[in-house]
Image (cartoon, rainbow, N blue to C red):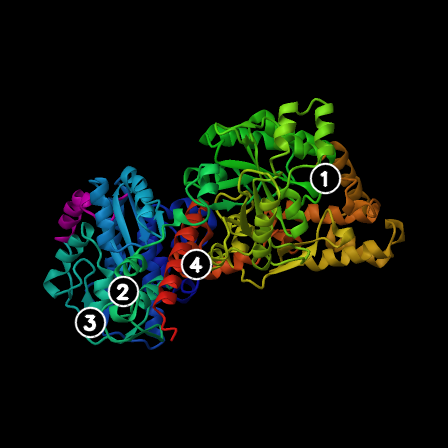
């Protein structure tokens, strides 16, 4: 915030910092100051300074305004621009107010998107939240509520159940713009009696009542604002009705521009930041009467699809979750216990990753997750077949069974292993109806129809017989296994090797599911979901429309506060677009053409990995590598002697069973060049996780284009900054807005004249 204006007015910045007693520049630009960002005492004065600098830049560019409107604390900047007081007098006022607000505790303010003010107030009244009130009405179905934090947090689910697309509880400890601040209002009013205000040179609209300031009412209006709801929507409507047809936003971001574009009312078209704004009238939009149809159809089209109704009810019931939404596992500890607990508490299913994590650390993560959240029935663990040795796979499934982890997802499994089959059928019983009931539920990720068929049918009898012979399964479990498919759920995903598009493959897998069910005696319905490429509610809506029972997200969860990767990586991921990823040869299947989607923005790893694979195929050993290539590898790729690189990798693999040494992908890749390739990717992963600043070009960040789509979707909103992208927040918003998109499409199709 403010990086584009600080250098333009260095003297004013220096004087402001001297008055405030802290560096506004460091506060706004230094990531180490992040803990201060949540403090009203620092944030409000800093915002006032940045707004003033931005206004002065606009003046220098020749921009003029007839009417000034400030949103919230921005009203002080509007009054300053109108000449009510000079900049430093206003800064002193703002600092006094901020210090009073900072002493408040126990309060909170939350943004609510997707509900009207009337609907929000109805929810508050019905639930009996005595301390909660509407703090601002910023646009159609876009507002804030304030009150005591305990009730604000409790109200979140009530708002979401009523159809809110997004509810974000902000860190502020004061119930801003609400009656709770009477004491602050009284103290600040006393302070204002000692201030003088000059006549206004321009019109200023007061946020509290959407009326114009008068010279004699400045002090009264500023005090009134503290405990009053901000009527931003009415302010804009007032300006447009009074002849304003051009708006220009001053300050950080373009959030207000987006709100102005959406404000409805009986207003003529306006222009915002040079963009013509078509203000929607009721007769033109969603409130238009439906042409034709009976009363039941009319009522149905005016109803709202709740996000909790999307997908399969069987899926939600089986996992004890509110939403048919899954946050897929991420490798190398990027899926953290904190992430899993947040999602579980909000009613979402998620999985811990095990790839790149020792068995001991996997156990610690599971134990911590269970202890912190008691979420043993609403989370699971992922096992990746291609990166497991047989010994590691045995150890993982034994660990999951011992700890009582009842939900497992599997990826990159192309054949059934004994450990997988044992885990699946171990503990199986019959339910009250006498039907086979698994103790452990399995979700299989697939990208081919033949693999899907493998998991939709029971395990081969030969494997069951061997497990019984070795005492791993009982005779009863073996009998039940004959009527139970390997997987309860199948998720169709896009394959990095390019073998299929998830949306194209989903209908085929759904048909296969129904065909298999008609030919076998399995009892339960297999739920089929879709994952890969789901970075916006439009993509999720497409999946649910085709018939998906659930949706699974991946990359978007990596750019969140809860993700276990470096802030440096998150800063990069926050800014990427859909074209900023590429395919690189995979670590464990590169010899047979396996590829994985990775980040390429500002990173050379995809190109360097492809060249390494080429050298692997060209040279049979490190000894055969020409000196010029060896110098490139040591000087640019690894920045150390290659013999030391190989020795380090060999020691690491001998000390653990982290990676498979005898997989199909490695049958022709057992030499030094194969080890060198793996060492480069391992190095890239560690550099990225650690956020090593001078090695960004060698970062390995697994990431899909879905994150680019997500960034575009949230651009201009509070979720543009990854620090606000809490996993439960983005999951809730995805599902709620998916429901809204589907409902709007139904309405459009149902009211279109097809004649």
Indicate left or right for 12 with 199 as reference.
right
Whether residue 242 is visible, yes or no, is yes
SS category of the residue bearing label 1? loop
Q: Disc 3 versus disc 4: distance between alpha carbons?
A: 35 Å
Indicate left or right for 381 with 209 as reference.
right
Estimate the x, y position of residue 346 in percent, counting from the top left. Answer: 41, 41
Confirm whether the magenta stretch covers residue 237. Answer: no
Estimate the x, y position of residue 418 in percent, counting from the top left. Answer: 71, 33
In the image as oriented, which residue stretches furthest toward the right?
624
The disc at residue 202 is 3
- Which circle's residue, 1 or 4, is located before the other in the chain? 1
Indicate left or right for 419 with 227 as reference.
right
Look at 47% across and 32% down and name the residue there: 375
Look at 15% across and 66% down and name the residue there: 212
Give yes or no for contact between labels 2 and 4 (Cβ–Cβ under 8 Å).
no
Q: Which of marks 2 and 4 is in front?
A: 2
Q: Disc 1 versus disc 4: distance between alpha carbons?
A: 37 Å
Estimate the x, y position of residue 348 in percent, counting from the top left. Answer: 45, 42
Q: Nearer the viewer, mark 1 or mark 2?
A: 2
Disc 4 designates what residue?
Answer: 714
Disc 2 designates what residue?
Answer: 287
Part of the protein shown in magenta: 174-193
Q: Disc 1 versus disc 3: distance between alpha carbons?
A: 70 Å
- Which circle's residue, 1 or 2, is located before the other in the chain? 2
Disc 1 designates what residue?
Answer: 659
- Which circle's residue, 1 or 3, is located before the other in the chain? 3
């Amino acid at each position: 915030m403010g990086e584009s204006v600080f250098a333009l007015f260095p003297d004013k910045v220096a004087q402001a910092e001297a008055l405030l007693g802290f560096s506004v520049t460091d506060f706004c630009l230094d990531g180490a100051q992040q803990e201060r960002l949540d403090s009203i005492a620092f944030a409000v004065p800093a915002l006032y300074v940045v707004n003033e600098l931005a206004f002065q830049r606009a003046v220098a560019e020749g921009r003029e305004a007839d009417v000034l409107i400030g949103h919230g604390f921005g009203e002080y900047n509007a009054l300053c621009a109108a000449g009510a007081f000079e900049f430093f007098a206003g800064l002193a006022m703002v600092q006094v107010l901020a210090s009073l607000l900072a002493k408040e505790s126990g309060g909170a303010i939350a943004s609510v998107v997707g509900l009207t003010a009337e609907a929000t107030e109805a929810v508050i009244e019905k639930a009996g939240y005595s301390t909660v009130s509407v703090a601002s009405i910023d646009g159609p179905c876009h507002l804030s509520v304030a009150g005591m934090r305990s009730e604000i947090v409790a109200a979140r689910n009530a708002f979401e159940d009523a159809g809110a697309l997004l509810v974000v509880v902000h860190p502020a400890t004061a119930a801003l713009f609400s009656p709770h601040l009477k004491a602050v209002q009284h103290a600040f009013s006393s302070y204002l009696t000692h201030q003088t205000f000059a006549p206004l040179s321009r019109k200023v609209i007061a946020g509290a009542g959407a009326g114009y300031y008068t010279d004699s009412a400045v002090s009264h209006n500023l005090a009134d604002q503290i405990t009053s709801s901000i009527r931003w929507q009415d302010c804009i409507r007032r300006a447009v009705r009074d002849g304003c047809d051009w708006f220009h936003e001053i300050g950080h971001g373009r959030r207000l521009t987006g709100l102005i574009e959406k404000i409805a009312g009986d207003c003529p078209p306006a222009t915002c930041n040079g963009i013509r704004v078509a203000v929607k009238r009721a007769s033109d939009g969603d409130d238009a009467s439906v042409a034709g149809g009976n009363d039941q159809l009319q009522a149905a089209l005016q109803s709202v699809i709740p996000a909790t109704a999307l997908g399969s009810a069987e899926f939600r019931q089986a996992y004890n979750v509110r939403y048919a939404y899954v946050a897929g596992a991420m490798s190398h500890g990027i899926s953290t216990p904190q992430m899993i607990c947040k999602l579980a508490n909000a009613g979402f299913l998620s999985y811990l990753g095990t790839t790149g994590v020792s068995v001991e650390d996997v156990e610690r993560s599971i134990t911590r997750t269970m202890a912190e959240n008691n979420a043993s029935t609403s989370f699971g663990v992922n096992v990746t077949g291609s990166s497991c040795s047989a010994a590691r796979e045995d150890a993982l499934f034994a660990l999951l069974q011992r700890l009582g982890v009842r939900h497992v997802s599997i990826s990159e499994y192309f054949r059934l292993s004994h450990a997988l089959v044992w885990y699946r059928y171990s503990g199986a019983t019959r339910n009250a109806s006498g039907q086979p009931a698994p103790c452990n539920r399995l979700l299989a990720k697939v990208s081919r129809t033949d693999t899907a068929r493998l998991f939709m049918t029971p395990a081969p009898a030969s494997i069951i017989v061997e497990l019984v012979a070795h005492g791993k399964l009982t005779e009863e479990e073996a009998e039940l296994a004959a009527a139970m498919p390997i997987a309860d759920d199948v998720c169709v995903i896009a394959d990095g090797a390019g073998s299929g598009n998830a949306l194209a493959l989903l209908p085929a897998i759904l048909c296969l599911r129904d065909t298999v069910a008609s030919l076998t005696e399995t009892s339960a319905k297999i739920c089929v979901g879709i994952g890969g490429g789901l970075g916006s509610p439009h993509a999720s809506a497409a999946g649910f429309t085709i018939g998906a029972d659930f949706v699974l997200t991946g990359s978007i969860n990596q750019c969140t506060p809860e993700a276990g990767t470096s802030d440096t990586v998150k800063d990069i991921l926050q800014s990427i677009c859909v074209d900023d990823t590429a395919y690189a040869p995979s670590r464990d299947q590169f010899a047979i053409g396996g590829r994985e989607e990775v980040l390429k923005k500002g990173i050379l790893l995809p190109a360097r990995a492809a060249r390494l694979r080429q050298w692997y195929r060209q040279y049979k050993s490190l000894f055969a590598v020409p000196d010029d290539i060896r110098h490139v590898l040591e000087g640019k790729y690894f920045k150390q002697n290659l013999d030391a690189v190989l020795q380090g990798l060999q020691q690491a693999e001998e000390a653990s069973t982290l990676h498979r040494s005898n997989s199909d992908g490695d049958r022709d890749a057992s030499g030094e060049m194969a080890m060198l390739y793996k060492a480069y990717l391992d190095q890239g992963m560690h550099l990225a996780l650690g956020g090593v600043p001078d090695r960004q070009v060698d970062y390995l960040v697994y990431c899909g284009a879905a994150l680019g789509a997500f960034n575009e979707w949230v651009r201009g909103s509070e979720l543009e900054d990854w620090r606000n992208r809490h996993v439960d927040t983005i999951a809730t918003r995805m599902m709620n807005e998916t429901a809204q998109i589907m409902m709007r499409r139904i309405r459009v199709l149902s009211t279109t004249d097809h004649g």
